């Protein structure tokens, strides 16, 4: 019996939401490599394989403004924004904000109403549809409490307590030799997490997460209250939540109503939170200070310059190529069968992949930008100078920086073979199940003495679920195209795999002749090792010989060493700068300050905010282009709607993936906006540097949300709830 394939269409596994900021889509160009195996294994130690950059004057704020609540910059906020943020202010900000899977949100009423982005709730909008409904395309609104629909397998987390557990972790780490510290660190984290979980277990709804800050310089235990009865209240149509589609994604001026409202219930009644952000009555003006409270996913601002150079030259081009090819395969499958509920989930996955594809295109450009990378060079030189001021710091951390640089050169020498197994993880949506099984079997067949590892690989093979046959075919074609991007279409290995046939024929041949084509066939094949060893899908990977497996294994070893060294270096960053800079993003609650501000772009000036007039201009200017179509109820505005109402605005807040759905509040902790994107100037650089010359966060304006709820959706119940919660 075929295993369920419903897991295939979950919208983007964790690493996708962590990659969010971007540029224009581009065909990835992976680094050119020599075709012979022997030459690929030779490393010229006299020449670097990575680009080098000249220093450009940097700022301490290049490391960003993603502040933690436990190390809140009270004095900086007070001086910069001329108000007095006391402990109660920060508590209110922290307790009103929430974390949801992959995104951020906030309580915005005294009846547990939660605000987030439409794109954060697309799957939930699809999930709550009844038979015959298309809630993703047509939107959803519950006129009464009883009409609000339960969302299955969903939760909202509220950070209720923070504990500093640094000493408990580092005492155990420092008690063992360096080569044992990684294991000791993880054991200590697991133990502390378990101990605190036991302490708070009487509450029944607590989740404990120990988070490494400053790459291991500090450790905090975050105690969340988890709410699991979440119901859909309102979501606009996809076309208005994603107005402009992929073309407008990561751009500004913008005209998106990227909002969704859930409600938290406790004991089958609307939850009444002690803390929430009321909607502001007047919105914002240019120059106003604003604060974004959310969960930025991942940044690399404490990485070394060598790490960033490797990322921009090798890692990102290969990953962009992979995503481009996956999108092609998934789109072909969606066009083949778009009628099923699974296909609607697949559409959400494609949206997310395109978002990440566009992001990585921008990141490639930013990681090769002389000005931005020059600032990182200067930043690192300042750090090294500070380390050299202390013999203890110098002797401890300078060798780490040097070894990390050596690792980047070693990783570069392993390409492209070390990158060719990207996307082949068991049960990944990114590749065919047939290829996943065959790759693991080919790897297992090379192992001679490690029975434990062979057993683990065998279990992984058996755990891989089936995918629909046509999807399998398209994903095999995608993988062949990915190999061609990395090796060149005329590479001898690729020619041997295809035997001169086109990729579609090769895919058909593998599906027809491989015993790894289904879970049932795989179970039979695994009982016949000789047959399995000669399976055509196993031969597909064996064609590459040693480089594929040995370089991938060496890459894994180097990455593990690098991770451990970076964790140790984090203590050096903290020793030099303390809490004067924020730690890298960790998808945990942060507060990010900024100012509402337009900027120069494209030879003109982008306004601080846009209005509904601009949205209708976009609609009428792009005739016969579906990305700028408007839903029927929007096509002709009502006479009562004020089209001069602001719909989106930009600010200098630091933003990255995971911040989607973050409330943007004024100094009175009133909602003025809902963050949903960064502009094109921010999308590539924001992972490794804060560059607020023209980089901006893009938010839905609270005034536009209320205007639409009143005059387009006739959602008087929500409007009254939001307005009454101001008192």
Image: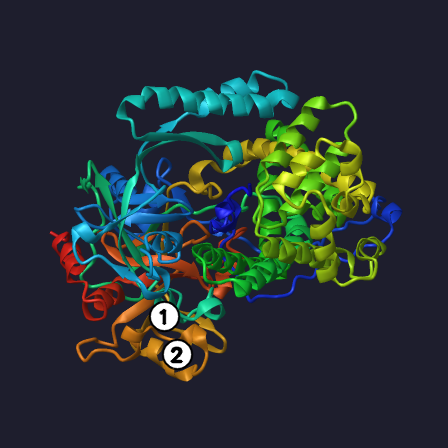
**Please, what secondary structure does the residue beneath circle 1 have?**
loop
Q: Could you say where residue 42 lies in the image, as x and y percent from the top left? A: 85, 44
Q: Is residue 684 left or right of residue 325?
A: left
The residue furthest front is 1
Q: Quadrant of the N terminus?
A: top right
The residue furthest top is 175
Query: In this figure, which residue is indicated by the disc labeled 2?
Result: 618
Q: Could you say where residue 476 lies in the image, as x and y percent from the top left? A: 67, 54
Q: Could you say where residue 253 lies in the image, as x and y percent from the top left? A: 40, 71
Q: Residue at x 18, y 80 (%)?
A: 639
Q: Quadrant of residue 556?
A: top right
As rendered, which of 104 and 727 lies closer to the eye? 104
Disc 2 crowd, CA 10 A, few/some/many (<14, 14-19, 20+): some
Q: Which mark is residue 104?
A: none
Q: Residue at x 75, y 32 (%)?
A: 528
As rendered, which of 516 and 629 lies closer to the eye? 516
Disc 1 to disc 2: CB gap under 8 Å = yes
Q: Residue at x 25, y 78 (%)?
A: 637
Q: Quadrant of residue 398?
A: top right
- The reply to whether residue 52 is in sight is yes
Residue 359 vertical placement versus 75 (above, below): below
Count of numbered tags: 2
As rendered, which of 490 and 16 lies closer to the eye? 490
**Please, what secondary structure does the residue beneath circle 2 have?**
helix
| Cα distance between the residues tagged 1 and 2 | 9 Å
Residue 29 vertical placement versus 12 (above, below): below
Q: Which mark is residue 255?
A: 1
Q: Could you say where residue 341 lies in the image, as x and y percent from the top left? A: 43, 56
- The reply to whether residue 389 is in sight is no
Q: Is residue 417 left or right of residue 60?
A: right
Disc 1 crowd, CA 10 A, few/some/many (<14, 14-19, 20+): many
Among numbered discs 1 and 2, the one appearing first in the sequence: 1
């Amino acid at each position: 019996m075929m295993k369920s394939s419903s897991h295939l269409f979950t919208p983007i596994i964790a690493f996708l939401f962590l990659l969010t900021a971007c540029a224009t889509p581009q065909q990835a160009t992976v680094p050119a490599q020599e075709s012979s195996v022997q030459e690929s294994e030779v490393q010229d130690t006299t020449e670097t394989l990575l680009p080098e950059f000249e220093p450009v004057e940097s700022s301490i704020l290049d490391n960003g403004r993603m502040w933690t609540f436990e190390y809140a910059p009270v004095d900086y906020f007070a001086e910069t924004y001329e108000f007095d943020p006391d402990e109660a202010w920060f508590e209110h900000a922290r307790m009103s904000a929430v974390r949801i899977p992959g995104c951020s949100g906030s309580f915005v009423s005294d009846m547990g109403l939660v605000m987030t982005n439409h794109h954060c709730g697309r799957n939930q909008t699809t999930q709550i549809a009844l038979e015959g409904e298309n809630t993703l395309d047509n939107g959803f609104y519950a006129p009464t409490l009883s009409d609000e629909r339960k969302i299955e397998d969903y939760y909202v987390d509220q950070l209720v307590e923070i504990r500093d557990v640094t000493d408990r972790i580092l005492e155990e780490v420092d008690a063992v030799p360096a080569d044992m510290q990684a294991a000791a660190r993880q054991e200590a984290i697991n133990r502390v997490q378990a101990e605190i979980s036991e302490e708070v277990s009487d509450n029944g709804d607590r989740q404990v997460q120990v988070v490494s800050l400053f790459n291991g310089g500090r450790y905090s235990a975050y105690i969340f209250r988890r709410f699991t009865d979440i119901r859909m209240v309102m979501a606009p149509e996809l076309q208005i939540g994603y107005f402009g589609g992929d073309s407008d994604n990561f751009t500004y001026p913008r005209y998106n109503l990227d909002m969704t409202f859930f409600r938290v219930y406790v004991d089958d009644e609307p939850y009444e939170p002690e803390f929430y952000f009321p909607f502001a009555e007047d919105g914002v003006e240019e120059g106003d200070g604003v604060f974004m409270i959310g969960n930025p996913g991942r940044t690399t601002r404490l990485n070394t310059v060598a790490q960033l150079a490797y990322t921009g030259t090798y890692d990102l081009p290969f990953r962009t190529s992979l995503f481009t090819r996956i999108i092609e395969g998934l789109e072909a499958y969606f066009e083949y069968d778009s009628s099923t509920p699974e296909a609607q989930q697949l559409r959400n996955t494609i949206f997310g992949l395109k978002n990440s594809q566009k992001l990585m295109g921008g990141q490639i450009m930013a990681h090769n930008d002389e000005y931005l990378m020059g600032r990182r060079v200067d930043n690192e030189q300042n750090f090294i100078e500070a380390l050299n001021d202390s013999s203890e710091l110098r002797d401890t951390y300078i060798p780490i920086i040097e070894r990390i640089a050596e690792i980047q050169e070693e990783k570069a020498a392993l390409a492209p073979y070390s990158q060719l197994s990207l996307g082949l993880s068991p049960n990944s949506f990114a590749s065919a199940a047939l290829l996943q099984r065959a790759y693991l079997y080919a790897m297992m067949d090379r192992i001679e003495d490690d029975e434990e590892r062979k057993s683990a690989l065998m279990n992984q093979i058996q755990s891989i679920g089936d995918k629909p046959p046509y999807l399998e075919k398209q994903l095999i074609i995608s993988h062949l195209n990915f190999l061609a991007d990395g090796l060149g279409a005329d590479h001898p290995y690729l020619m041997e795999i295809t035997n001169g046939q086109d990729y579609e024929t090769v895919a058909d041949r593998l599906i027809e002749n491989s015993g790894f084509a289904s879970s049932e066939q795989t179970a039979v094949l695994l009982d016949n090792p000789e047959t399995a060893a000669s399976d055509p899908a196993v031969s597909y990977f064996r064609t590459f010989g040693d480089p594929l497996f040995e370089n991938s294994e060496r890459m894994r070893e180097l990455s593990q060493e690098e991770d451990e060294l970076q964790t140790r270096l984090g203590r050096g960053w903290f020793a030099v700068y303390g809490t004067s800079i924020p730690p890298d993003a960790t998808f945990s609650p942060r507060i990010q300050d900024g100012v509402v501000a337009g900027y120069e772009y494209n030879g003109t000036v982008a306004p601080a905010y846009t209005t509904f007039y601009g949205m209708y201009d976009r609609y009428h200017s792009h005739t016969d282009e579906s990305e700028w179509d408007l839903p029927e109820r929007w096509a002709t505005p009502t006479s009562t709607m004020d089209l001069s109402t602001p719909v989106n605005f930009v600010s200098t807040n630091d933003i990255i993936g995971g911040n989607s759905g973050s409330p943007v509040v004024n100094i009175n902790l009133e909602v003025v906006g809902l963050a949903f994107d960064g502009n094109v100037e921010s999308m590539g650089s924001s992972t490794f540097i804060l560059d607020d010359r023209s980089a901006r966060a893009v938010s839905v304006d609270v005034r536009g949300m209320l205007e639409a709820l009143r005059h387009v959706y006739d959602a008087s119940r929500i409007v009254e709830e939001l307005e009454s919660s101001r008192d």
